[in-house]
């Protein structure tokens, strides 16, 4: 009878330690997961910037050309509003600068409020896209 009590006591102690160890490991794992997810959230929120600026164009072909120019490393998303003559862009400043984004757009023939497109590139645009001309059909 005495032996059973001692065995039962050790069994309870061992079982109790198993619960404590398991609980502690679960808390450590949980806190590591929380730390990692907060780091991911912190970096992603700090790493992206949004900007809006003027980009001149006329039509759907202009819009397609401008948005294709935004398909660059470091640019997360972007688009062009024809009515406002404005680009919106979400980018990672660690990978691309705002000045580079203006250059990408100017390189395909569209003036921005910071850079003017090269005349030869502009003149090579289809007639409907010549936004500097007064006689543009748009």
Image: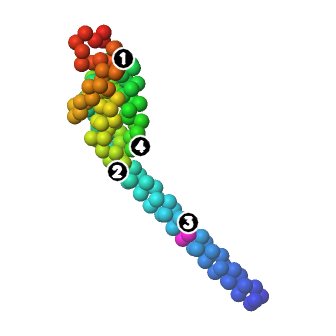
Local packing at callout 3 (Cα closer than 10 Å; few below 14, some 14-19, many 20+) is few
Between disc 4 and disc 3, the foreground one is: 4
Quick check: 93 above or below 13? above
| Dominant secondary structure of the residues highlighted in magenta in the image | helix
Which residue is the site of mark 3?
Answer: 26
Q: Earlier in the sequence, mark 2 or mark 4?
A: 4
Point out residue 117 in the picture as x, y percentages from the top left corner.
27, 29
Q: Give the secondary structure at mark 4.
A: loop
Magenta-colored stretch includes residue 26 = yes
Residue at 36% x, 17% y is 126
Q: Earlier in the sequence, mark 3 or mark 2?
A: 3
What is the distance, in whole Å, between disc 2 and disc 4 at their CAs?
A: 11 Å
Q: Position of residue 125 (x, y in %)?
A: 34, 20
- In the picture provided, is 133 more to the left or to the right than 62? left
Q: State the residue position of label 2.
A: 94
Total labels drawn:
4
Q: Nearer the viewer, residue 25 or 87?
A: 87
């Amino acid at each position: 009878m005495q032996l059973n009590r001692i065995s039962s006591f050790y069994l309870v102690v061992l079982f109790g330690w198993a619960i404590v160890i398991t609980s502690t490991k679960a808390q450590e794992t949980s806190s590591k997961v929380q730390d990692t997810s907060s780091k991911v959230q912190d970096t992603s929120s700090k790493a992206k910037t949004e900007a809006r600026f003027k980009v001149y164009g006329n039509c759907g072909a202009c819009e397609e050309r401008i948005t294709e120019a935004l398909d660059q490393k470091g640019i997360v998303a972007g688009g062009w509003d024809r009515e406002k003559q404005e680009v919106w862009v979400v980018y990672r400043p660690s990978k691309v600068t705002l000045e580079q984004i203006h250059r990408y757009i100017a390189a395909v023939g569209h003036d921005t409020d910071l850079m003017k497109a090269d005349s030869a590139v502009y003149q090579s645009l289809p007639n409907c896209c010549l936004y500097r001309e007064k006689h543009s059909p748009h």
